[in-house]
Amino acid sequence: MVISVSGDAPVEVVRLLADPARAAIVDVLAAGPACTCHLVEDLGLTQPNVSNHLRALRHAGVVSAEPHGRYTYYHLNADALDAAAAHLSALAARARAAADSRREC
């Protein structure tokens, strides 16, 4: 079960990608669709571990699943990553704009 503190999709994506295994899965999928067996082999993780991470990523809209015969191929949703990147860019811009303003105690 994925617990979201904000309910904001880009923030949820950033939170999910903070996990090294999920970030590695996304990195592999950036090279093209892959099935669970490919991810297990490429990352050295167990099949249940990969499946649990994929479920969280699917729930957040980062990946989508496409059945193909006996296998399910996972595709990366570039729009979800673009939204997360835009969110981080906006935070960086806010930080630059407020760098010299200090709140009084």
Image: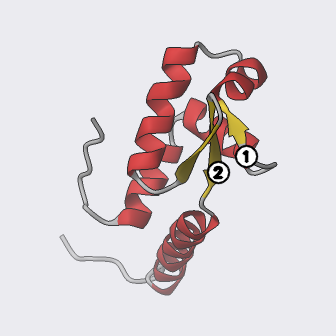
Q: Farthest residue toward the right?
A: 31
Q: Position of residue 31 (x, y in %)?
A: 81, 48
- Say whether residue 60 is left or right of residue 44: left
Quadrant position of residue 76: bottom right
Q: Position of residue 16 (x, y in %)?
A: 45, 45
Viewer-side residue, 56 vs 21: 56
Viewer-side residue, 71 vs 79: 71
Residue type marked 2: His
Circles 1 and 2: CB distance less than 8 Å?
yes
Q: Farthest residue toward the front?
A: 69
Classify 76 as above or below 50.
Answer: below
SS for callout 1 = loop
Q: Farthest residue toward the bottom?
A: 97
Q: Which mark is residue 33?
A: 1
The 10 Å Cα crowd at callout 1, few under 14, some 14 to 19, many 20 or more, is some
The 10 Å Cα crowd at callout 2, few under 14, some 14 to 19, many 20 or more, is many
Residue located beneath label 2 in the image: 75
> Residue visible at 44% across and 27% down?
52
Q: Which mark is residue 85?
A: none
Quadrant position of residue 104: bottom left
- Say whether residue 4 is left or right of residue 21: left
Q: Position of residue 87 (x, y in %)?
A: 48, 73
